[in-house]
Amino acid sequence: MKEQACSNHSLIATSALSSYRVLEVLKNVEFYKPVLEQDLRAAVYLSYQPWAARQPDHVFEQSWKWLLSYSDGRVLEPDWAMASLQVLAREFLESRDGTPRVRLNKFGAWQQSVLSRISRLPIQAFAIAEERHRPSGVFRLGLGQAVQARSVYGMITPFDACVEDYVGREGLHETHLHLNGSTHAEICWLRALRDPMAEVRDFDKKWRSTKTPHATKLRELANSVNPNLKPSELLRQLHVAAQLRKWLSATANGALNNESVLPTSYELLERGHAPSPPDIISDRFSSQLDQADELSLLLMVIERLKAEPSLIVARMLHLYVVLQNQYYRLLVQSEEQFGFDQFQKITYTDLREPAERDYYQRFMSIHGDAPESSRVLYLEGRFAPKDTAEKNYSLMQSMLFGYLRYLNRDKSNSWPLSLSALLQKLDEKIEAESNVRIRTHQLALVAHFIKLPWSNSPEYKAGPYRFYSLRTDIEKRAGLILQALRAFPRLQRWVRGIDAAANELHAPPEVFASVYRVCKTAGITRRSYHAGEDFTHLLSGLRHMVDAIELLNLENGDRLGHGTAMGISPKLWVDRMPGQLVVKKGDWLLDLLITWQILRQIPEETGEAYRVEGIISDLAGEIFGSEISCTSLGRAMKFRGLNLRYLMASRSSTWRCDSASFSDLWSAEAKLVANARNTNSADLKLLTRWLEDKALWARSEALIEVESAFFENNTFLRIQQAVMRLVRDRGVVIETLPSSNVRISQYHNFTEHHALRWMRVPGYLQDGDPEIMVSLGSDDPGIFAGDLNSEFYQLYAALRSLGLGDMTALKYLAPLNERGRQYRFHAMDSVLKG
């Protein structure tokens, strides 16, 4: 089974269902008039061509004709929406036991090329409708029943008997999921249509903000979707879409007749001058509308159009789908948006914020479609601690109340319980259901601190030493989390670990070292850290991984998130990067320092170690203004993880590490500083210059050009393997996140993913690779249009595409899931019961 890429005609179909150029064509033609082929073709071509710029035009022409062939025989005009949905459904979906499933050899292309651009629900609806119309079709639900017989909380995936048997027996174990970022765009869409003004309010604030650089990034994202997509335009689009949905609901429910006066143009809907649709009770927007309701609506509309073609209804459906996908592109990272910076732009929109105040839908999505059995057994949900105790308590209530509703299958969103009462109710519920056969996922919460940028440039408040503001902020947030655990002892069952997330280019591991130690002393003993995910240079990613392990003292089941730098093929990375890269001198100095220390341990790389040592000496001389040996610099930088507040204060002759002003938790940090001051004063003096000398800051922030191929591929490989040995020897588990890495790294598809190397698959395993422990996670499934089940299937599909049989593929893949179970962060009573 060879993995297949997305066809050109399916890429064209996604453009026909999502492009702003197509939207402009549809807006300018009255609903009762045909859309001319040449107008739509031009719009689609201009949207498609940049993505396929290296292909000759005849490839587009033939694919366009292929798409057009799906419209033959239409009564009134080519129905572009139906034709596009048909192309996509036939290429990617198949029926398995009465349910649309993705073809296994197309699953990578489905998630990367289709779901990164458009919502799955219209395609899914079309597949169901088409199956019903076949003589042997197995979908036998009545028109009015639509999809009420089953939910569609889970993402649509392939069906493989071997995988289904394994997941049914063992369940999946989620070790890396951000609760905010996991809500799927379809849920946010329904929330947006209920109250467009509320949906756009936060988006508009971010757009207008002058206090952060987010506004610029947000505009870049919006302009890449639609150059006209300002907050006011988004609001207009949502208002039109809400009206269209009501008309489509009236159509689906048979509420229209020959006497009905239908809207005739987009302009009338936009201005509020169109007639109002019949008041269909079932379409009144409520907080209980979910993906099943949307799928049901789309299915009934498509079936109506198949039975009774209508030009106006077809045009309204097309417009509705395009508007939905304009919005969708603001919430889902597209295939052509590589890198963490593109990912972060999606988080800046705040469009998930209104929907994500309610956690019930997220837990239901993680559970999946089988009512009696969650596909996920253990779930670690990450959340960002707030900056006040009240906000933290409110956040805890919201998360845990959503989880209680999930356990009770309670769609209502009342809020009758205090945090204390809620914690007690959860304990009682879990105890009462310990012997119940319904399999639900067990929740653990992981507090993740956010990496924020620092710079000595004027727009940043640099403070007295590097990352002063961030260090102060995370100490405050950590203190508030520990305060909550003291105030509510039952919370200790739920808050099981800490992490640091966001853009690793913004803050290095040492900033979090002191807080990590304090949290461990306070009883939050499980730690993870995002590292090696996105990096200016391959050596930078590897340095961050080493620093995280050593400065945060990760060991014995602690985890690193991503670790792409340690797994990606050096040749692939070099080939896909520019020949020269621009980095900051100070960062490159630290990268080379760690690299030099590694190279000295590799007998084959003695010559490279001497070369790097010379470069470090030159760079250090430029930055520090004096000659500094690599050995001295290395000793000083090993103390970067000290608490800088105490380090700077310790220079005073009156400072005492046993002062009564230190709490019991923080006194250990003061003693670490005192010990270092007593034994390594010269090293701390050099480190202090690095940390607080503003002239040195400017020199370290200066830019330098370096070669991507700084080493031969074999040298890069040996450095990676040295980091892998460190991971192995410390007992650190790597959380691998396939979809996230394919979007954020340099991969084009899942068969290139480094997890195959870590699974020790022949052809990917490199000579000298040590065996390491790896778990599986989904990261931000809403942004990547997936879930943990999808991640498991993506790696399985990649293995099968290599020619491996089902049991052999599962043999390589299952250990990733098992590591998630073995090294989960859940409470000990849950571990014993598991």
Image: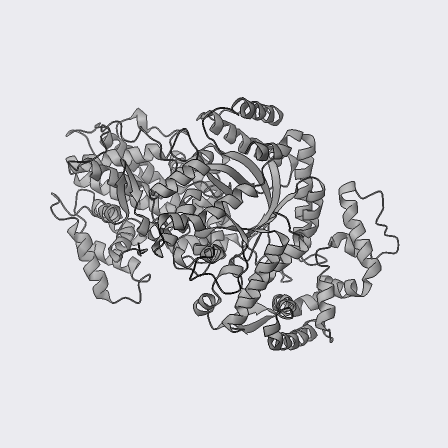
In the rendered image, residue 693, in percent from the top left (x then y), is placed at 73, 65
Residue 15, position as x, y percentages in the image = 29, 53
Residue 236, placed above or below residue 397: below
Q: Residue furthest right?
A: 654
Q: Could you say which is closer to the camera, residue 680 or residue 232? A: 680
Q: In the rendered image, which quarter contains the N terminus? A: bottom left
Q: Residue 170 appears at what percent x and percent y? A: 46, 38
Q: Relative to residue 559, is residue 645 drawn left or right?
A: right
Q: How many marks?
A: 0
Examine the rendering and report whether any part of residue 176 can be seen.
Answer: no
Residue 77 lies left or right of residue 374; in this view the side is: left
Residue 527, compared with residue 213, is above or below; it is above
Say how the picture is coloured: one colour
Quadrant in the rendering for residue 237: top left
Is residue 27 visible to the viewer in this orientation of the structure?
yes
Q: Which quadrant would residue 42 be assigned to in this image?
A: bottom left
Q: Position of residue 700 (x, y in %)?
A: 65, 68
Relative to 442, 456 lies left or right: right
User: Which quarter shows the C terminus?
Assistant: top right
Q: Nearer the viewer, residue 665 or 493?
A: 493
Residue at x 38%, y 43% (from the top left corner): 163
**Among the 4 quarters of the image, the one containing residue 699:** bottom right
The residue located at (82%, 55%) in the rendering is: 675
**Drawn side of residue 711 relative to residue 458, left or right:** left
Q: Nearer the viewer, residue 733 or 809?
A: 809
